[in-house]
Image (cartoon, rainbow, N blue to C red):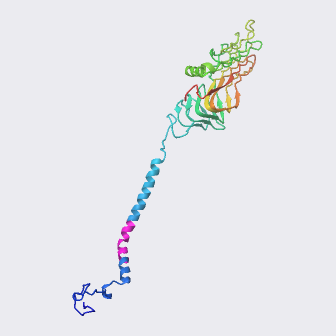
Amino acid sequence: MICPKCDTENPENARYCSHCGAKFEPSYENTLPAEDEQQAESILFEEVRPYLKILLILLILFILAYIVLHFWKSAPATHAYSTTTIVTTTVISNPSNGMAFSGDVKYISNITLTGNIGTTGNVIIQNGVTVTTNGHSIIAGGTLNNQGQINAGNPGDSAPESTVGKNYPNSYGGSGGAGGGGGGQSESGSIAGNASLSNTKISSWFNSGFINYLTGAGGGGACALNKSGGAGGSTTVPGGIVSNINSFVPCTDSGGSPGASGSYGIYLQGRAIVAGSVNASGLQSLLGEGRDSGGGGGGGVVIFSYGSGGFTPGSYSVAGGAAQQDSGAGGAGQVWIYPYGNSPPINP
């Protein structure tokens, strides 16, 4: 490189003149044009672009994996339960096995219970559905909502001809009517007096079996040839007796019909109750042509036991079985509505 001031020859890459010390300005040949610099940057970007794409894909996959894992952990577990196990997350339809449940119990078609139903949730009986309790209870920690019908069912303990109807001496259901005695109308059954309910009494009845305290008695069987009819079964009140017991008149037929069955009672408990339609009526005996008839069965007792959620009344039938030829009708049952407040008599 030649110094422009003193013409001294210097090394090509020298920055100052070795003779006069003048500073050399960079020449055009030693500088990179702007176009070349941009081209270099473009080449560099093209070289790293595949790596940037890979990093971006990995980042997206990481975010998606995090989201999926987060929702998978937070989603509620689902399990398949049968109607014979305790449930926690699902509605059980038509349970009838007498188990305790933790979820809502929903009846969607007609069914007869084979045990008490208890749940900490709600019990729903859909419109048009009949649940026959057959002496068993329905106990809900939430609301018992009866949109269909609850039917008590009948013990099926009809008295044969000329025999006394089935007794339930501790029950507050109606007593049975007497069977026809071959002359004159026989007596009807009686309606029992009210019981003073309490949590203690209800719990005791539950443990001993509500059947003993809420069932209507059976009607007496009608007379057979040369025999008198049978008296109606008793509850806490006497059943009907044959009207001509002291002046026996032989039956003119060849045999009378048996007495009719009374009705089971029903115990229903819920923090709130929508009563709906409830039936605990005694049965009517058969009427045969030319034959005396058995006495009607007594109606059962229905207990609605509700808590702080309140009670919505419904329609109830607790009649005794009607009288037939020369027989007595069954005594009517009763409906008791018991507010327990915040402490239920029976824990589901």
Check the image and report above or below for 336 versus 4. above
Q: Nearer the viewer, residue 26 or 6?
A: 6
Specify the quadrant that holds the C terminus: top right
Does residue 196 appear in the picture of this structure?
yes
Magenta stretch, main secondary structure class = helix
In this image, 171 relative to 82: left or right? right
x and y, in percent, of residue 146 in the image: 65, 34
Residue segment shown in magenta: 42-54
Which residue occupies the extreme top position in the image?
A: 246
Report if residue 90 lies within the magenta region: no
Check the image and report above or below for 278 versus 1. above
- Which image quadrant for residue 54? bottom left
- Which image quadrant for residue 274? top right
Report if residue 48 lies within the magenta region: yes
x and y, in percent, of residue 300 in the image: 66, 22
In this image, 242 relative to 111: left or right? right
Residue located at (61% from left, 21% from top): 198
Which residue occupies the extreme front position in the image?
A: 20
Q: Nearer the viewer, residue 111 or 317?
A: 317
Q: Nearer the viewer, residue 344 or 222?
A: 344
Does residue 282 appear in the picture of this structure?
no
Specify the quadrant that holds the N terminus: bottom left
Q: How many marks?
A: 0
Which residue occupies the extreme bottom position in the image?
A: 7
Residue located at (27% from left, 92% from top): 5
x and y, in percent, of residue 25 in the image: 31, 86
Which residue occupies the extreme right position in the image?
A: 184
x and y, in percent, of residue 58 in the image: 39, 62
In this image, 11 relative to 123: left or right? left
Q: Nearer the viewer, residue 245 or 106?
A: 106
Residue located at (55% from left, 30% from top): 118
Check the image and report above or below for 165 versus 248. below
